[in-house]
Amino acid sequence: MDFKLTEEQELIRKNVREFCEKYVEPIAAEIDENSRHPAELFHKLSEGGWMGIPIPTEYGGAGADYLTHIIVVEELSRSCSSTGFTVSIHVGIGCTLILLFGTEEQKRKYLTPMAEGKHLGAFVLTEPGAGTDVLAATTTAVLDGNDYVINGTKVFTSNGPIGDTYLVFAWTDKTAGRKGMSAFIVPKGTPGMKAGEHLRKMGLRSSQTSEMIFKDCRVPKENLLGKEGMGLQMAMSGFDSGRIGIAAQCVGIMQAALDESIRYSKERVQFGTPISRHQAIAWMIADMATDLSAARFLTYYAAWLKDQDQSFRKEAAIAKLFASEAVMKHTTKAVQIYGGYGYCKGAKVERLFRDAKFTEIGEGTSEAQRMVISANVLR
Ligand SMILES: Cc1cc2nc3c(=O)[nH]c(=O)nc-3n(C[C@H](O)[C@H](O)[C@H](O)COP(=O)(O)OP(=O)(O)OC[C@H]3O[C@@H](n4cnc5c(N)ncnc54)[C@H](O)[C@@H]3O)c2cc1C
């Protein structure tokens, strides 16, 4: 068993950390406060090659492994969870699904600019009446000549208002049940597709989330991803990869909350001594360090399995479930260590606490992860 990261992975971590300290950390509070998508930052992320780390070089990526991408998401999330998540869903679901299921032409036309960071991807599955219950979706895609015509309303689409390449899931044959949904690549500007207003959220505020409305939206037949009826299978496969990214997002938030807690507890004096010397605080920090280690190992293990081409659905769900529940306990402790100052704007732990909650909901709630895990261990 080798727990050591490669020299290349360590170097990329160092480079991303330096990048974050220079470009992400200084704007993280402002983009959260204003729910602003930092286009200028994403331009720099593209230049750095961070938007397509695990995608082969022939399709515009860096040709590295998935674990390296996970380290990038972790380090970005340590400074700004919204930025980490945007990269995570763009690469982990958007790019990954086209890489796995796209035709050669789709890879050249759509994946390459995405992996180069010129185009941002979006995953358009959830609907107002269909969250955990994906099969309750009502959006349809009807073949008409050489086009599919998409009609329906989606909700909670990350990158909705700012995306370039949308992966849209719709029924092509509702009577076929789990084999009746299909996925389509819909480029920005396609007539009939419209993004709603950016939703105001508790956390992850600079990640842009919106409704997507499809009204007689025509896409050519060649924009079908995979085969007709494979939509659900592809969505689940996208979740498998994406969930490791959410777990990495948790690890980044946890590292930041621990760093902040250690620093503050050594500075803050009460009863004539730094609060870190009060055992109650020291033990909170010990528990935080323990949860962080466990979350990081589970996350890296799931990514490593993916890189070995081994099955990783259960391990991705385990990593996401553990890390997202741990990050909630962890950021609660960080706010507690800060006392009243942690409850106020200006303390980084306040933002980390709000950002953490998303991880128990997005890409399948904790209950959904338990469904995946129990289905795998009880069979
Ligand atoms: C910030 C943000 C970004 C998102 N980005 C995207 C995106 O890019 N693309 C996309 O398609 N979706 C996205 N989502 C949607 C997300 O995946 C859904 O919110 C999530 O799957 C839950 O669906 P829901 O919100 O409709 O909750 P519901 O499914 O209505 O669930 C409500 C509650 O009931 C529980 N529940 C439901 N069914 C069961 C059951 N059978 N057993 C036990 N408990 C159950 C859930 O766990 C939850 O606690 C995003 C959501 C958020 C908040």
Image (cartoon, rainbow, N blue to C red):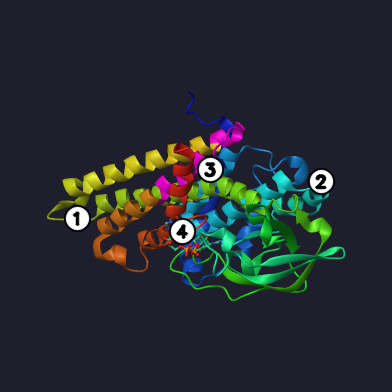
Classified by dominant secondary structure, the portion drawn in magenta counts as helix
Q: Does the closest atom of ligand 1 sit within 8 Å of the Cβ of label 4?
A: yes
Pick whichever, 356 or 176, lies toward us: 176
The residue indicated by pointer 4 is: 361
Q: Does the closest atom of ligand 1 sit within 8 Å of the Cβ of label 2?
A: no
Residue drawn at point x = 36 percent, y = 54 percent: 328
> Does the CB distance between marks 2 and 3 fall below 8 Å?
no
Q: Give the crowd class for mark 3: few <14, some 14-19, many >=20 residues within 10 Å.
A: many
Q: Which mark is residue 71?
A: 3
Q: Secondary structure at mark 2?
A: helix
Q: Reply yes or no: does residue 42 show up in magenta.
A: no
The residue indicated by pointer 1 is: 269
Q: How many marks?
A: 4
Q: Give the crowd class for mark 2: few <14, some 14-19, many >=20 residues within 10 Å.
A: few
Q: Look at the image and give the residue range highlighted in magenta.
A: 304-324
Q: Residue type at mark 2: give it.
A: Glu
Residue 257: tell me if it is visible.
yes
Q: Secondary structure at mark 4?
A: loop
Query: Of label 4 and label 1, which has the lower sequence position?
Result: 1
The residue indicated by pointer 2 is: 104
Residue 168: tell me if it is visible.
no
Query: Of label 1 and label 3, which has the lower sequence position?
Result: 3
